Amino acid sequence: MPKMRAAIFVEPGRIALDEKPVPDIGPTDALIKITTTTICGTDIHILKGEYPVKRGLTIGHEPVGTIEKLGSAVTGYREGQRVIAGAITPSGHSYACLCGCLSQDGPGEKYGFKAMGGWRLGNTINGVQAEYAVIPDAMANLSPIPDGLADEQVLMCPDIMSTGFSGAERGGVKIGDSVVVFALGPIGLCAVAGAKLIGATTIIGVDKVPARMEKAKTLGADHVVDFSRVDPVEEVMRLTDGRGVDVAIEALGTQATFESALRCLRPGGVLSSLGVYSSDLKIPLSAFAAGLGDNTIVTTLCPGGKERMRRLMSAVASGRADLSKLVTHRFKLDDIEAAYDLFAHQRDGVLKVAITP
């Protein structure tokens, strides 16, 4: 049986490169030869044991590659075709999908547990930090890469671009809106770019890392606030002439950023939460206006499926969204353990890494 290299979860604190059999596929699947992938913050939660997965699982959920083999029931694609698939891989026919919520298509649906819904790659099935990977329900998930686009130009589409843009979309950003984004990591930076693309005219980024604040300006932020120097809520209120923002996007997943985002809203504003929280949230009485502020709180799990990927790649191909500049470091798959060490400890100004087998 042919073998391949893959990054696997060994135990909390250790993800290692190992050798595994090249996986077989079912009739509705596709086998993808991975040409570029990356590491996500969620993978770091797995590494640290903060998010449980089975030992020996191949990690990763952001694939760019070529079709190596198609299942017998898959039509409309060809071997050798360049494709991506979203981090979320919906079946297209579950209750969640038929209700229009593709990201929540998962085995927990039938039990009433919907968190992480359709996230299967590197979670409930083997992922894509490997030489080859199986994409389930290929006809619902494979999206051909437009001619002329390089791997790194579409590398952000499967997860952080889809997630960050959805923060603005779910927040209902409209032309002329004011938006604040708390935490300018990769997803927060994508939220800045998404808000700009949709039509926000005042975008405020909150962080303390100078390089990230400068990157936010290149992606559309009109103002950046260093929360280590000033009270971010007071500064956002000053920048909006005391009105507050129409939409606050929380992109970190902490009590402090959630609460600050809530306090920045105008009456009737929307808090769009993208963060993954590791403990219970508390909603302060004053920040919530005792429940009388007409505010809306929405959450988002990265939208997936081939149509979502097509739309995001169209934004890239049009020149309206260039997120390849988020790639700051490049590694070969053989060096993925070093890539994890760099990314987990956020050294050397790392934002995203590109990993090529």
Image (cartoon, rainbow, N blue to C red):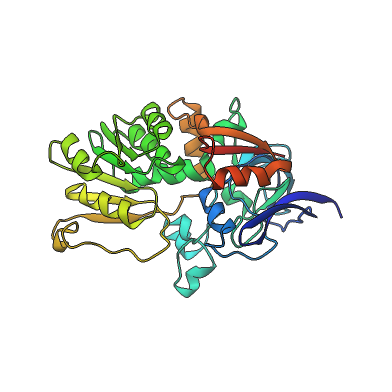
- Left or right of 5 in this view: 245: left
- 237 vs 198, nearest the viewer: 237
From this view, report whether residue 53 is shown above or below residue 185.
below
Who's the residue at 48% across and 68% down the image? 109
- Compared to residue 31, the image places residue 283 above or below, namely below
Residues 156 and 145: in front is 156
Q: Residue 273 location in percent, x, y?
A: 35, 52
The furthest residue to the front: 229
Residue 202 image offset from top left, x and y in percent: 25, 32
Q: Foreground: 33 or 291?
A: 291
Asked whether, in this view, residue 91 is left or right of residue 101, the answer is: right
Which residue is at the far right? Answer: 1
Q: Position of residue 114 (x, y in %)?
A: 45, 66
- Residue at left 71%, top 57%? 27
Look at the image and tell me in which quarter the N terminus lies: bottom right
In front here: 211 or 114? 211
Please state the horizontal and vertical placement of residue 191, each as a whole percent of the image. Answer: 38, 40
Number of callouts in the render? 0
| 298 sits left or right of 285 in the view | right
- Residue 91 shows in the view: no
Quadrant the C terminus occupies = top right
In the displayed structure, 74 sits above or below 106; it is above
Residue 168 visible, this orientation: yes
